[in-house]
Image (spheres, rainbow, N blue to C red):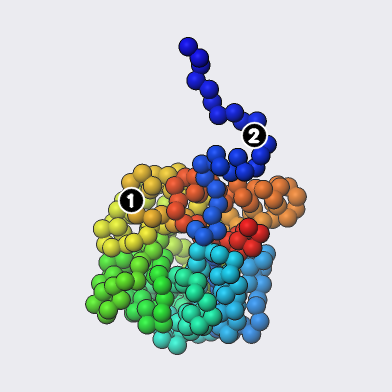
Amino acid sequence: MFPVQRLRRNRTDERIRNLLAESSPDKSKMIMPVFVSEDATQPEPVSGMKGIFRYPVDMVGEYCSKLDNYGLGGILLFGVPSRKDEIGSESYNDKGVVQEAIRKIKVSSGIPVIADLCMCEYTSHGHCGILNGNYVDNDLTLDSYSKIALSYARAGVDIIAPSGMMDGQVSAIRNALDKSGFSRIPIMSYSSKYASSLYGPFREAAGSSPSFGDRRSYQMDYRNSREAIRENSADESEGADILMVKPAIFYLDVIYRSRQNTNLPIAAYSVSGEYSMIYNAVESGTLSKDFINESLTAPFRAGADILITYFAESYARDH
């Protein structure tokens, strides 16, 4: 009897290594987050994320056309409005910053446009919904989310991504879209979004830091993983087309468990803090540049179908 032979590991031919690789980054499965600012006149660098900018509405179409030419799978759009109020009314203004950006992008390229749906960038208090005292009123907020979804749909969005973590948000948005003739627009739900300390650079970019308290009452406790499966199941039953785990690299176990419990596509969002740590470590020479590829591979290996990452542009450009 001959012993069972393992695949020989002394391969030096990169093509063979690639052939045998179980998981690898795929730019067509990557989404680039894009910030568009109503007040910007030139691309504005985000101080906490080197290489990331806030784009003026008039320039975002040209930028997204470049991303399209690189072969990326799409963009995830975030708006930075010039005006905020207690109820975030600019979020569902048909002439608002995201709505105008969607139209500009659609004229310039065919790249799929995913629009983040939340109110934290639009409320004067920085929370993700309408307040009742010091707490977000879940049910009142759902009405605003429905208005935002319809406004995005009228602007021509391809996918809507609700991120506010309100109970029933997917059902409310799905019903609003279906009743208004937009039943073909998919929903990518931030179904497992954790109350993480890794969002700091994003909040600087989007101007969305809460003016008091935190978001732990409606985002998930990072100590919990079974809760993620419950949240995924709830959003799937409400009509979500894609589920999301956020953050990604620090939550590979959640991505893996989610993959075992659903047949829906799973998106993983490698967030701003993850990007900044990796970028700074590579730039300083502490880690080699290949660590970026390693970090991009991990979510796919864990079971993600889609990766939202701030490295998407640079990876696609180089590959």
In the rendered image, which quarter is residue 276 located in?
A: bottom right
Pinpoint residue 134: horizontal percent, then vertical percent: 39, 70
Three-letter amino acid code at the position of disc 1: Asn
**The disc labelled 2 sits on which kind of residue?**
Arg
Residue at label 1? 263
Find residue 55 and name its label: none
Residue hosting label 2: 11
Q: In this view, does 95 lie above or below 190?
A: below
Q: Position of residue 183 (x, y in %)?
A: 28, 72
Q: Is mark 2 on a helix, strand or loop?
A: loop
Relative side of 226 to 296, left or right: left
Secondary structure type for disc 1: loop
Query: Would residue 95 be found to the left or right of residue 198 on screen?
Result: left
Give x and y (percent) for residue 231.
33, 54
Tag 1 near tag 2, CB within 8 Å: no
Image height of 192 relative to 42, above or below = above
Horizontal arrangement in the rendering, residue 90 relative to residue 139 (left or right): right
Q: In this view, does 138 lie to the left or right of 105?
A: left
Q: Residue at x 54, y 55 (%)?
A: 26
Quarter of the image with the C terminus is bottom right
Give neighbour class at mark 1: few <14, some 14-19, many 20+ (Cα, 10 Å): few
Q: Residue at x 60, y 75 (%)?
A: 63
- The residues tagged by marks 1 and 2 sit, at their Cα atoms, a distance apart of 35 Å
Q: Residue 45, located in which quarter of the rendered image?
A: bottom right
Whether residue 220 is visible here, answered yes or no, is no
Task: State the residue at coordinates (56%, 83%).
Answer: 57
| Circle 2 crowding by C-alpha within 10 Å: few under 14, some 14–19, many from 20 | few
